[in-house]
């Protein structure tokens, strides 16, 4: 049996199928992303009888009910949503929802004399040659005879017969042919997932999360649209609380649900530490509720797949939707989310740029939710989540494709009576003394400022409430919160003047320190030996030229905070490589001490 069959239908029939629910558009699988000009071009192709591509549909696998009968699912529109939405918006006059959750009409105008389409604009509204909105022509109550009479009266250069001929051609667009590729309902979920992921729509590569969201969206029997909206609105509100009123105005039905009440707290909430996308939310909810890491498994479970018998069962569909819904509600809980953010802050994560691995954050939240569900005591949860997050960053545990590691780790945490036992086991294997003495200093040998290892060093400084380099009262945390920049301990210009012209040389992260701008400007292009001599003299003479440090003991402490070796007072360009090695070792030790205190 073929994996698919190819048929032809027309635009009118397709729109009718969608309105009748025979083919389900996942309710805003992605927001409508086409520009109005692209809608115009699509209509022009239909008018000129050019091919406009295929749409791809797939019927859910037949699920077996408890009484032995078979449930036939809806057909899902896998590819072609943007085209179908564009047609319904322009021809049927339906509103589309933008990425900002504003509803708007896309009005396409038509000039019968030039047989040209254009996006409606103020100039067109003033030009009698244009039909300003073609949806009026497609309306069932459109008075063709009366319109022709009025139009030709205003534009005598076109005859009644010619205009009638053109209008007939325009309205016949709804009978234009469009290809439909129907994927066989007997196809294995994994195969359909792979087909779905390989399809590109509007220039955006689809993912397993997109497919899962499509599966959720079209199942109105098990509250799929409610779950989808909860996920989607939460992820938009966490980034843009200002869209709250638009959601209330545009989706009053959802605004009256208990789910909406549970995300209302986002209206006045701002965080730049963890801003999950719908893919992140799905992954976290799925990982902790199903104890699995592969999102393709979620698609299978939402379809009712029994992994042992390879059959599809309605009771599995029902159970999977209920568990996913519960996982989503746990994720969006104000108490859970804010407590997780506090754990991140307590580990020194005060800004999203300090943790570039979204996967590490996602697993940390999944772990938090799992331990909460297992009723582990709060202090243990705090410690385990903090240490696991930092350990996963140290080892880059979830870099690349994280799914198999998510699957492995969540199962181990679930089966451990004491979650710290699993943390300790991983530490013994991956964070041995050799790691701190050799591997981490080697990892610090890089010029990539977004390196997780430099970020971990900064997190350790925030955790210890360290002051910035050569600063008496300004902390590293304050500089980051005010978007301060890192500066070079060996000034960049100084190194360039002495032959270090390779960016990988002077931009080593072991040459970076958070410093006040006024301090950096005062240092200029001097060697460390020279500018540190000025600092020593200002302590002796009580004349502040570089920063505000006026005490030798505090200067020593400040250097320790920033992992600057004591030799700094004697260093010039000839000692640069030696300095980098010394500082990497000190930075690694500080990160190790920080990790042990979490």
Image (tube, rainbow, N blue to C red):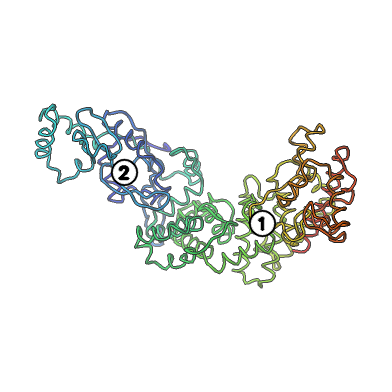
Query: How packed is label 1: few (under 14 Cα within 10 Å), some, or many (20 or more)?
Result: some
Query: How packed is label 2: few (under 14 Cα within 10 Å), some, or many (20 or more)?
Result: many
- At a point 53% along the width and 65% down the height, the residue shown is 330
- At a point 85% along the width and 60% down the height, the residue shown is 551
Q: Position of residue 233 (x, y in %)?
A: 45, 57
Which numbered circle lies on residue 106?
A: 2
Query: Which of the pair 419/47 is nearer the observer?
Result: 47
Residue 173 horizontal side relative to residue 480, left or right: left
Q: From the image, tell me which residue sits under label 1.
A: 409
Residue 62 horizontal side relative to residue 382, left or right: left
Say which element carries label 1: helix
Query: Which of the pair 531/46 is nearer the observer?
Result: 531
- At a point 18% along the width and 35% down the height, the residue shown is 128
Which numbered circle lies on residue 114?
A: none
Residue 359 horizontal side relative to residue 148, left or right: right
Q: Position of residue 338 (x, y in %)?
A: 58, 66
């Amino acid at each position: 049996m073929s994996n698919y069959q190819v048929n032809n239908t027309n635009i009118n029939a397709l729109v009718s199928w969608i309105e009748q629910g025979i083919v389900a558009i996942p309710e805003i699988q992605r927001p409508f992303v086409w520009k109005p000009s692209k809608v115009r071009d699509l209509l022009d192709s239909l008018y000129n009888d050019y091919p406009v591509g295929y749409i791809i549909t797939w019927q859910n696998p037949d699920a077996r009910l408890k009484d032995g009968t078979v449930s036939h699912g809806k057909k899902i529109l896998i590819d072609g949503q943007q085209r179908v939405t564009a047609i319904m918006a322009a021809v049927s006059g339906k509103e589309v929802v933008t990425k900002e959750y504003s509803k708007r009409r896309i009005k396409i105008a038509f000039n019968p004399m030039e047989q040209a389409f254009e996006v409606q604009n103020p100039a067109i509204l003033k030009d009698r040659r244009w039909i300003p909105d073609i949806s009026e022509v497609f309306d069932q109550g459109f008075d063709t005879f009366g319109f022709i009479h009025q139009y030709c009266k205003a534009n005598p250069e076109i005859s009644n017969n010619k205009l009638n001929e053109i209008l007939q051609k325009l309205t016949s667009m709804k009978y234009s042919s469009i290809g439909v590729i129907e994927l066989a309902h007997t196809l294995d979920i994994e195969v359909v997932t792979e087909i779905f992921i390989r399809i590109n729509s509007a220039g955006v590569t689809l993912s397993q999360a997109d497919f899962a969201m499509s599966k959720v969206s079209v199942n109105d029997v098990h509250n799929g649209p409610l779950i989808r909206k909860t996920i989607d609105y939460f992820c938009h509100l966490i980034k843009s609380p200002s869209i709250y009123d638009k959601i209330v105005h545009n989706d009053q039905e959802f605004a009256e649900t208990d789910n909406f009440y549970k995300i209302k707290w986002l209206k006045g909430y701002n965080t730049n530490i963890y801003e999950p996308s719908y893919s992140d939310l799905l992954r976290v909810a799925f990982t902790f509720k199903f104890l699995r890491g592969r999102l393709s498994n979620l698609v299978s479970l939402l379809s009712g797949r029994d992994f042992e018998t390879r059959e599809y069962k309605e009771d599995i569909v029902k159970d999977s939707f209920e568990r996913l819904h519960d996982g989503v509600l746990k994720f969006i809980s104000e108490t859970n989310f804010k407590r997780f953010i506090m754990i991140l802050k307590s580990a020194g994560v005060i800004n999203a740029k300090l943790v570039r691995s979204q996967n590490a954050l996602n697993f940390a939240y999944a772990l938090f939710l799992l331990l909460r569900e297992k009723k582990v005591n709060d202090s243990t949860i705090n410690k385990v989540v903090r240490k696991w997050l930092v350990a996963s960053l140290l080892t880059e545990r979830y870099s690349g494709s994280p799914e198999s590691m998510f699957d492995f780790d969540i199962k181990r945490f679930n089966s451990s009576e004491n979650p710290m036992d699993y943390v300790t086991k991983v530490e013994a294997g991956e964070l041995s003394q050799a790691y701190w003495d050799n591997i981490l200093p080697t990892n610090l040998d890089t010029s990539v400022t977004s390196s997780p290892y430099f970020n971990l060093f900064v997190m350790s400084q925030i955790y210890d409430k360290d002051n910035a380099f050569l600063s008496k009262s300004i902390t590293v945390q304050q500089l980051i919160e005010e978007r301060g920049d890192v500066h070079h301990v060996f000034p960049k210009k100084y190194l360039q003047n002495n032959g270090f012209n390779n960016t990988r040389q002077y931009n080593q992260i072991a040459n970076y320190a958070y410093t006040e701008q006024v301090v950096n400007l005062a240092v200029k292009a001097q060697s460390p030996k020279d500018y540190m001599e000025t600092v020593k003299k200002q302590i002796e003479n009580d004349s502040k030229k570089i920063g505000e440090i006026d005490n030798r003991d505090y200067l020593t402490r400040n250097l320790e905070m920033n992992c600057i070796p004591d030799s700094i007072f004697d260093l010039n360009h000839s000692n640069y490589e030696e300095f980098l090695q010394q500082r990497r070792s000190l930075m690694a030790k500080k990160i190790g001490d920080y990790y042990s205190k979490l």
